[in-house]
Image (cartoon, grey):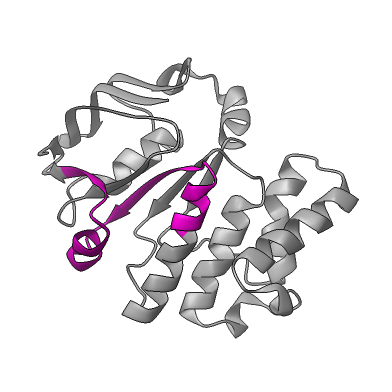
Amino acid sequence: MISFKSVGKRYGGFEALKHVSFSIKKGEMVFVAGHSGAGKSTLLKLLAAIERPTSGSIHLGDQDIGRLKQSAIPYLRRKLGLVFQDHKLLYNRTVFENVALPLQISSFDPRESASRIRAALDKVGLLGREKSRPVELSGGEQQRLCIARAIVNRPSILIADEPTGNLDSEYSEVIMDMFRSFNQVGVTLLISTHDEAMLEKLKPRIITLHQGELAS
């Protein structure tokens, strides 16, 4: 389903990724591990076509992501749910309006959108907070809001960059339980983390990066 073949990414004279190759099957939950600066975030950005590879190829199904025209990228992202480290929430809008944004971009029918938004908020335990602003939420609730926004399009692939990085262990457990529940219904997950304790507990499939190279 997802295939990286000898992928490299260079920023000026710095090589963020070097000759990275791996594949992920439909329905897998895979973690990307490594030290800070190992290339984890770069790898996820390449899959989401936020960045383009300098060398090699990235395939999602039969699509070569690195060669997609700019006009085709929004259609690619309809297949993806994205959870970022820095939330990227709109603080001047309500919880409901933040989750609505991907559906508005995709020109969903407003009546169907409202149903999907409430279902996504219910899934992450925020249905009672739909009129709140993000600033009124705790850090863990803001992360759950990001997840609701990521899943409202019902994507086949969920990409999460350090989703538990700024959370305590209790909230981290809640977030990971959510991801496991998505995976159990067939969503493919690719999650970056440096939380070794969580990896030891879950014992998932792990792609480990070291200084931009595939270590294991």
Answer left or right for 116 relative to 72. Answer: right
Image location (x, y in percent) of residue 33: 21, 51
Query: Where residue 54 appears, x then y in whole percent?
Result: 28, 24
Q: Is residue 30 above or below residue 92?
A: above
Quarter holding the N terminus? Answer: top left
What residue lies at 18% left-to-right and 52% top-to-bottom?
A: 37
87, above or below 184, in the image: below
Going 68% across and 72% down the picture, which residue do you hit? 92
In the rendered structure, the answer to whether residue 143 lies left or right of residue 126 reads left
Q: Nearer the viewer, residue 104 or 179?
A: 179
Residue 86 seen anywhere in this rendered image of the structure: no
Task: Report the number of numbered marks.
Answer: 0
Residue bounds of the magenta highlight: 179-208
Residue that sits furthest to the right in the current view: 111
The residue positioned 51% from the left and 43% from the top of the image is 187
Q: Residue 54 or 193: which is nearer the viewer?
A: 193
Check residue 173 for magenta coloring: no
Residue 39 versus residue 118 in the image, above or below: above
Name the image quarter holding residue 91. bottom right
- Residue 50 % position (x, y): 45, 38
Say which of 68 and 158 sits in front.
158
State the image coordinates of residue 43 (x, y, percent, origin top left).
Answer: 31, 39
Q: Is residue 12 left or right of residue 134?
A: left
Q: Quadrant of the C terminus?
A: top left
